[in-house]
Amino acid sequence: MSFQERVAFIWGLADLLRGDYKDAEYAKVILPFTVLRRLDCALDAQSLDKLKEALLDGFHPAAQDVMDCFDLRDQIPRLRLNGLLSLLIERFSQVDLHPATVSNHEMGSIFEELIRRFSEQSGSSGGEHFTPREVIRLMVDLLFVDLPSNDEPASGTRTLYDPACGTGGMLSVAEDYLREQNSGVRLEVFGQELNRESYAICKADLLMRGASPDHVHLGNTFLRDELAGERFDYMLSNPPFGVEWKKAESVIREEHQRLGFAGRFGAGLPRVNDGSLLFLQHMLSKMKPEGSRLAVVFNGSPLFAGDAGSGESDIRRWILENDWLEAIVALPDQLFYNTGLYTYIWVLTNRKSDGRKDKVQLIDATGFSRKMRRSLGAKRNEISPEQIREIVRIHTEFRDQPHSRIVNKQDFLYSRIIVERPLRLNFQASPERASSLDAATAAILAGMDSALTRDQSAFEQALARRFRAAGVKLGRVLKNRILHALGERDCEAAPFRGPGGKLEPDPDLRDSENVPWGEDIAAWFEREVLPHAPDAWIDDARTRIGCEIPFTRIFHELQPLATLPRTGAGRGSSTPSPAAKTDSGAMSRRARAKAGSVSASTISTAWASACRWTTRRGAPSRPKTAVDACSSRATCCSKNPAAANCSPWAWWCCTIMAPPRSAPISWRACRWLRALIRRIFATSMPPSTAAESPGARSSSPLAFRIWIPIRTSPKW
């Protein structure tokens, strides 16, 4: 029999189980029987009686462990009851799997092909323990890029480890690759797996290949590291995406606090609902001092999840500070069996070449795929061998090109600052405002003047006189509580000062911003924030260093906005453009009127587009929408745009975009809106020049309509 004939014969035996077993259960019978037949042939036990005895404690302890994990002993009564046991044994005895006929490598390939077919047959659940072979091959190619080929013979032994080895696919593909590239190098594989059936398949695969099955262990990698103290030359893994580590939380936190960097999780702890970066820290702890390489596949979350100062951010920062991150490769979507999300291969090493030091290569391989003839679960795309070679070539060349960016590691760092603005209140001793106070205090305040005032000092003096007249001591805590109860936000009022005369920030106006690493925070703040919010300040005690990898934003290229047809020359003009005159029949009166005027809803749509654009491109600080950003206190800006703290952009936002109920949006939102308008104009001309001759600079009536209210703002 040839290789394909043996695979087809064993695969066909699953038809015997049809009706008595579900499709997803076939592997529980066929795979362990394949292992038994191989061992039976190796022991020259060709008789049916000896094979039947093998089902009962007749083989190597490792094989018995495999049978126990498959629960084969529980399957035997079921097979016997349905009259299948003797039939399966007889049919399996017809295929020759003797080592003299089928080498260890060929036997491993047969077993791998059976695993693949059963995994595909199980549908989406197959992806839980089966990584697509082309993804593994790409990871292996990137991992072993430093190994010499057969043209440069090498010898010795290398070690490879997978902390979530599943069915052992990565281990076997790595072995095959090394055998092809340099047959003089021997690879010893190690692994640990949580799922019993996946562990059994992996161990059986090692038995089929003639490798040591004792190097693979069963158990939770986080709870108990079965290979503690071991170090490896290479590491590969595809840990589960977005799986929480709550079961092992107490053990992990205890190790983090007790051992710090002497343990596995010294850099930090991510959120409990995603343990991806815990796997990465575990693997990094097993690098050899003289040098190791590892490749791991994640979803997009580890790139940017977590604010500055969070566990995820600290872990990324720790990796970059140690200069371990060599490259990240963005893979196409719909590549895995159980998820259609985009995934990323991280390549890390502690033996970077001189040219790669302090730099990180980002490779956009999202377009390197082809459609499959038949979908398998969520998998609809695959990477061809030619595309794998092209991705590896891009990685090896290490230069800027359309699908590659070379980034300094410091560019991923930033300082996160908290921007505060003062609380502004007016005061009124009215029964409605005093209703939130206790009855005794409200009774004392009942005799006060109920006129509204914006003068905090005068109101405090009146308050003190009232309490003295009532014979009650007015302490600092009570006075502060009364001021907050009787105060309402008022953008025209002076900043509110709390105990000790200290400015009190307004929580509703609190904002955060990411300042690029290496830039002077004070200078950046003066340039970017103060022009829009002159009363703002930085809470220095809450400044944090953060780290994120904005992969999408780095590869994004701005596209010019489409130009709207020009139909009018000025505000309120109904005169059609020459083009419209020559083709008046092509546009109805309603359409011309709609094109010639821009309503508040149109502006809101443009603003929403800006929000989506910045969010989609991975903006470090996404602007707020008009509804979210407009606070209840600032209605006065629409009534009185000349107020001291109403910037022209805030005035425009509240009076033009959604009058009259909304309030001005935040200073950051106005900054993004200004950028949007500049893109519409496609020019950086001063506003005065643009307002004087908008038609000369843009054929877009939208741009013209936007500039008119800004130019006429009293604060401009």
Image (cartoon, grey):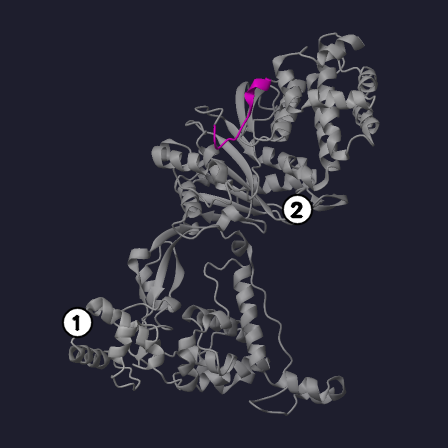
Q: Residues within 10 Å of mark 2 (few under 14, many from 20)?
A: some
Is residue 274 left or right of 336 when viewed as pictured?
left
Tell me if residue 531 comes above or below residue 217 in the rendering: below
Q: Hey, what amino acid is under mark 2?
A: Phe
Mark 1 residue crowding within 10 angstroms, few (<14) / some (14–19) / many (20+): few
Under circle 2, the secondary element is: loop
Q: Residue at x 58, y 78 (%)?
A: 601
Q: Which residue is mark 2?
A: 368
Q: Nearer the viewer, residue 25 or 397?
A: 25
Above or below: residue 16 compared with residue 385: above
**Rendered residue at 66%/26% (across/down):** 201
Q: Would you say residue 222 sits in the magenta stretch?
A: yes
Q: Relative to residue 185, is residue 620 drawn left or right?
A: left
Where does the image place residue 495, in percent across and percent down from the top left? 28, 75
Q: Which residue does the numbered mark 1 point to in the structure image?
A: 473
**Numbered disc 1: secondary structure:** loop
What range of the chain is rendered magenta?
Answer: 212-224
Name the one closer to the observer, 370 or 318. Answer: 318
Quadrant where the C terminus sits is bottom left
* Vertical side of 440 occupied by 709: above or below: below
